[in-house]
């Protein structure tokens, strides 16, 4: 049985609105730039603010920006790769690279889970009951009712 058929038989909806509520879709991440060339943070702020759905604020440090975005529209990896391709130089000490790698993985996993259909966990037995009832099976007795009750 195809997965789509099983979902329809179990009455599952694929609108995804149910698992978006409270799922932490809005992210606030810090992006830190190197000292050289000077003025990178200001230029990057303008570039990022031009993107629809991205809000940029100043960070605690002059070379730091805080970006706010919806994880279904953007990821930190996508934003940072776009900045690097545009010629910006991000601060890359080891601890920051490890932290970024963890964020990339978490956001990628979250997006994958949000975009995949709901799994059939507790209602899977109903699918097979409905499928069994819809098809002819061995429990059907073709003997007329008056002969079945005759003893």
Image (cartoon, rainbow, N blue to C red):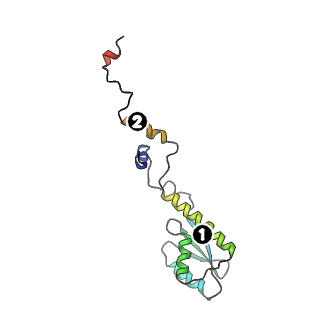
Q: Quadrant of residue 67?
A: bottom right
Q: Quadrant of the N terminus?
A: top left
**Where 145 falls versus 112 (above or below)?**
above
Q: Quadrant of residue 106?
A: bottom right
How crowded is the residue under tag 1: few (<14 C-alpha within 10 Å), some, or many (20+)? Answer: some
Q: Are marks 2 and 1 in contact (CB under 8 Å)?
A: no
The residue at the point 48 percent across, 42 percent down is 124
Tell whether 62 sits left or right of 130.
right
Residue 28 shows which numbered tag? 1
Can you give x and y, in whole percent of width and height, for residue 53 in the image? 50, 71
Can you give x and y, in whole percent of width and height, for residue 105 in the image? 59, 64
Q: Quadrant of residue 146?
A: top left
Q: Nearer the viewer, mark 2 or mark 1?
A: 2
Q: Quadrant of the C terminus?
A: top left
The residue at the point 48 percent across, 59 percent down is 115
Between 18 and 109, which is closer to the camera in this rendering? Answer: 109
The residue at the point 68 percent across, 74 percent down is 94
**Residue sticking out furthest to the front:** 138
Tell whether 1 sits left or right of 107.
left
Query: Mark 2: which secondary structure?
Result: helix
The residue at the point 66 percent across, 73 percent down is 96
**Where 69 falls versus 12 (above or below)?**
below
Residue 132 shows which numbered tag? 2
Can you give x and y, in whole percent of width and height, for residue 62 in the image? 66, 82
Can you give x and y, in whole percent of width and height, for residue 89 in the image? 60, 82
Tell whether 136 sits left or right of 100.
left
**Where 17 falls versus 123 (above or below)?**
below
Between 89 and 46, which is closer to the camera in this rendering? Answer: 89
**Where 9 falls versus 145 (above or below)?**
below
Between 76 and 95, which is closer to the camera in this rendering? Answer: 95
| Mark toward the start of the polypeptide (2 vs 1) | 1
Query: Mark 1: which secondary structure?
Result: strand
């Amino acid at each position: 049985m195809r997965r789509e058929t099983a979902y329809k038989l179990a009455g599952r909806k694929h609108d995804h609105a149910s698992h978006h509520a409270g799922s932490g879709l809005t992210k606030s991440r810090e992006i830190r730039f190197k000292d050289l060339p000077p003025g990178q943070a200001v230029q990057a702020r303008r570039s990022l603010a031009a993107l629809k759905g991205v809000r940029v604020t100043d960070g605690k440090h002059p070379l730091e920006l805080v970006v706010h975005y919806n994880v279904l529209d953007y990821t930190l990896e996508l934003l940072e790769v776009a900045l690097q391709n545009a010629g910006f130089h991000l601060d890359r000490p080891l601890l920051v690279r490890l932290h970024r790698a963890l964020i990339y993985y978490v956001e990628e996993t979250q997006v994958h889970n949000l975009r995949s259909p709901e799994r059939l966990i507790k209602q899977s037995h109903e699918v097979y009951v409905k499928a069994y009832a819809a098809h002819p099976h061995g429990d059907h007795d073709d003997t007329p009712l008056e002969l079945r009750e005759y003893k």
